[in-house]
Image: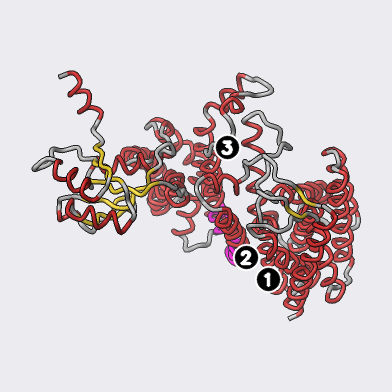
Amino acid sequence: MRLIYCFVLALAAAALLTPAVMALARRMGWVVAPRQDRWHRRPTAIYGGVAIYLAFMLSWLFLGGRSSQDLVLVVCAGAMFLVGLADDIFELKPQVKFLAQLLVATVAVALGLRFDFIAWTWLNVPFTLLWLVGVTNAVNILDNMDGLSSGVTLSAGTILALVAAVKGAPQLGVPAAALAGAAAGFFIYNFNPAKIFMGDCGSLFLGFSLAGCTVLGAGGASNLMLALLIPVGVLVVPLFDTALVSFQRTSHGRSIAQGGRDHSSHRLVFLGLSERRAVLVLIAVSLAGGLLAIFLHFLTPLVAMVVIAVVIVVFVFFGVFLGGVKVYNSPERARRRWQSPLLDQLVLHKKQLVQILTDLLLLSAAYTAAWLLRFEGSLGPEQMNLLTVSLPWVLAAKILFLWLFGVYRGEWRYVSVHAMIQLSKASLAGSLVVVGGTLLLRDQGYSLSAAIIDFFVSFFFLAGSRSLVRVFTESIMHKEGEPVLIMGAGDGGELLLRELRNNPALPYVPVAFVDDDPAKRGLVIHGIPVLGTRHDIAELADKYEATRVIISILSPVDGGLEEVFAICRRAGLECVRVQPIVEQELEHTA
């Protein structure tokens, strides 16, 4: 109950203090005007971080503990708040701002706020410093869209408070609950359209506090993986966004410190999501990451590693998908401040390199999963030794056949039946080699069943990874445009549907198919239903507010298309026919 009281008090305080700060900011002229590299469209009050900090402190002072690490976290978080406030007022140089952050983090570590899971204890100091400063800046740069930073903090703080309640750790639970409550109270006014911004005083405070809470929450873990599960899980969104922005800006010749509309939230909006929906999607991802981290704690380390490997691949391909969104101007893409033949080759073939690296990770996870399935989820020392010894040979054989069968020459966006067939051939060839090796070494304890299971698991993992970009494309992309009906629910209609969806230059959104074949009625093609024949065009156009019918039929039509054009004219619809290129060329040569 103490954590609930702490959350509610911080929420109420932030909900009351934020309007007061907002009114003062407007009276004093503390507002930020719209800018080209910013997302807001009207002058907006700043210094909302003051309300967040005061609400947090009020809750902690009334209900918080007084342990040494608790005090260190709160005092140093307050110092980070002052660094952010100074930056908001005086616009500190990036070097000065970074040195101030490093100084605060150093003091925190020196006073005992640090990880303790690395065997070489001295390594805990630089690792914690890197973590505190890195997460602080990750949350800072995440503050790029209304409600995003405060919403992610609400999610992360709630998960950390839940972990503290399970562990019985008030030194973690109280600051985490207070942080979540303060973020929730501010979120009410910061969600799109934002009435106030938190500024660096808010984002730096939230970032450092979250980082410090995760350090407290990692205490007592037996190894590095378990210790980092909760921190990385609850902070997956800021860490992912920082990695994406850093990689994309570096590869496009831009400074990492340079602002711009190239964050994950911006890219989701460019894909067609509303600002609110983009923020809610990322908050949901943050919440899912934290809950997954808690769930993994109940699994054995080896099973958890398999799940983590799959999750890493999902995020890698989500980053590849978002990285494909065009957010930079064409001349800017071609410019780089330094040239290197080796780097040019790496950039040129970066997709193939990413695919090979992810395949290595997935094949390792699949082979491990096969052994776990064979031995009912638990491997003894002998099985672990056999798995470790054989894994490099299995990876070498499978990657070799994937390369020989041309799997790495495919384009991720265009996963086809042919690509899946080639993948199945390569997987089968690699698995046959593994099975053959297992038969030769079976007397040493290698399991033939595990080798056979590995084929199915590895193919499932590899096929799934190659479908991820297309899954993201079809589930996230939302195109606005003129509703249209497609005449022809065959190969021509399917080709047209994909072109209309994937080509942003075509301002049309298919809403339904019509086809004269009654057997096709009720079918669904890529999510678009077949709802009638040519005689239903007028009714369907009225129902879906369509103003255009596009005919895309490859085969000859019984009775011709004159009746379709006549139906459209009577209904006031524009009707055009898309002819195959080959047919146009034949007509031209004739």
In the rendered structure, which disc, 3 or 1, sits on the residue that comes first in sequence?
1
Q: Badge 2: how crowded within 10 Å, few (<14), some, or many (20+)? A: some
* CB within 8 Å, label 2 to label 1: yes
Circle 3 residues within 10 Å: few <14, some 14–19, many ≥20? some
Q: Position of residue 5 (x, y in %)?
A: 76, 78
Instruction: Using the numbered discs, state the Cα–Cα distance from disc 3 to disc 1 in whole angstroms.
Output: 38 Å
Q: Is residue 449 left or right of residue 39?
A: left
Please give the count of numbered marks on the rendered protein.
Answer: 3
Which of 106/285 is in front? 285
Describe the colour scheme in one phrase. Answer: secondary structure
- In the image, is residue 587 above or below residue 459? above
Query: Residue at left 55%, top 50%?
Result: 309
Residue holding disc 2: 294
Residue at the disc numbered 3:
327
Q: Identify residue type, mark 2.
A: Ile
Q: Are discs 3 and 2 less than 8 Å apart at CB? A: no
**Residue 533 falls inside the magenta stretch:** no
Does the image show residue 129?
yes
Bounds of the magenta segment: 291-308
Q: Quadrant of the C terminus?
A: top left
Alpha-carbon span between mark 2 and mark 1: 9 Å
Position of 562 with respect to 228 (left or right) is left
What residue is pinned by disc 1? 162
Q: Amino acid at mark 1?
A: Leu
**Residue at left offset 52%, top offset 51%:** 273
Q: CA distance from mark 3 to mark 2?
A: 35 Å
Residue 307 highlighted magenta (yes or no): yes
Q: At which x and y percent is residue 519?
A: 15, 55
SS at mark 2 in the image: helix
